Image (cartoon, rainbow, N blue to C red):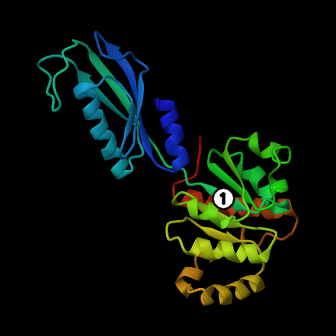
Amino acid sequence: MDWLDALQHLRTAGLPGVLVTVTEVRGHAPREAGAKMVVGAGAAWDSVGGGNLEATVVERARVLLATGATSPETMVFPLHEHATVEHGRQCCGGVVSVLLELQRARPAVAVFGVGHVGHELARVLSRLPLPLHLVDSRAGQLDPARLADVTDGTAQVHVHAVPAPETVLAALPARAHVLIMSHDHAEDLILCDAALRRDDLGTVGLIGSSAKWSRFRVRLREEGHDDAALDRVACPIGLPGIPGKAPAVIAVSVAADLLRTLTDSGDLPTA
């Protein structure tokens, strides 16, 4: 795949990468200004010129990935026989500047249950550049016409109409934030159980009252989950102190709380 497809692949998988761009060429060089490649932890796509230049760039990009560097970095490569190299000489005669930009992995958000509240929440979240999974066992809730005001947003929207939503939860990328708000308490319970069987998720939120969660805690403890695991589930969800049960009010409260979490973890998408 080319560099653009590679970026999309990494975003979908919830993995970080480094975008490498040739920013300036003086004299002769193997690639022109504007050439790009993407470097991941275990693979690289496209090319900025091969040879020592590219091998050195890949090495440095993986250092940036390992350290989580936040600032772009420029590297300059003289391409002549006197240049210091580690991976073979390139004697094109020019000088190449490349820019390395870390592309952070954006954690996915998964909304289980796209009823009144779920739909309002999806509308808000769809305006952010993040992977957004919408899951419902009722296919009608995910009709394209109904979701037109969601899919026209910035988010990468993935729609899952499945009879067993817990299968989608099991396949979510690591660090995904899970919001459980289905039409059926039995389905909510199954989803909570599935979420607690993963230790690599972000936050897990359950819509409902504290009384509902008290009943769920008893059932989930019977399934083998201890108190430390159960404390990973937030219920009720949303910012405390915001009154109102209208779907839009709940959705805005939940979205605001999630944005606070993303900000605290440095994952708030800005572009």
Q: Quadrant of the C terminus?
A: top right
Residue at the extreme front of the image, as rendered: 163
Is the residue marked by circle 1 packed among few (<14), some (14-19), or many (20+) residues within 10 Å?
many
Residue 37 lies, in percent from the top left, at 41, 30
**Residue sitting at 66 percent across and 51 percent down?**
132
Q: In screen coordinates, is 66 left or right of 143?
A: left
Q: Is residue 46 left or right of residue 186?
A: left
Evaluate whether residue 235 shows in this view.
no
Q: Residue at x 67, y 71 (%)?
A: 191
Q: Is residue 47 visible?
A: yes
Q: Is residue 20 left or right of residue 184?
A: left
Q: Position of residue 7 (x, y in %)?
A: 50, 38
Residue 130 percent location from the top left of the image: 62, 48
The front one of 181 and 139 is 139
Q: Position of residue 223 (x, y in %)?
A: 60, 86
- Give amino acid for label 1: Ala
What residue is shown with label 1?
110
In the rendered view, tell whether residue 179 sits above or below residue 52: below
Q: Residue furthest left?
A: 82
Camera-nearest residue between 91 and 69: 91
The quarter of the displayed image where residue 196 is located = bottom right
Q: Secondary structure at mark 1?
A: strand
Picture layout, residue 21 above or below residue 122? above
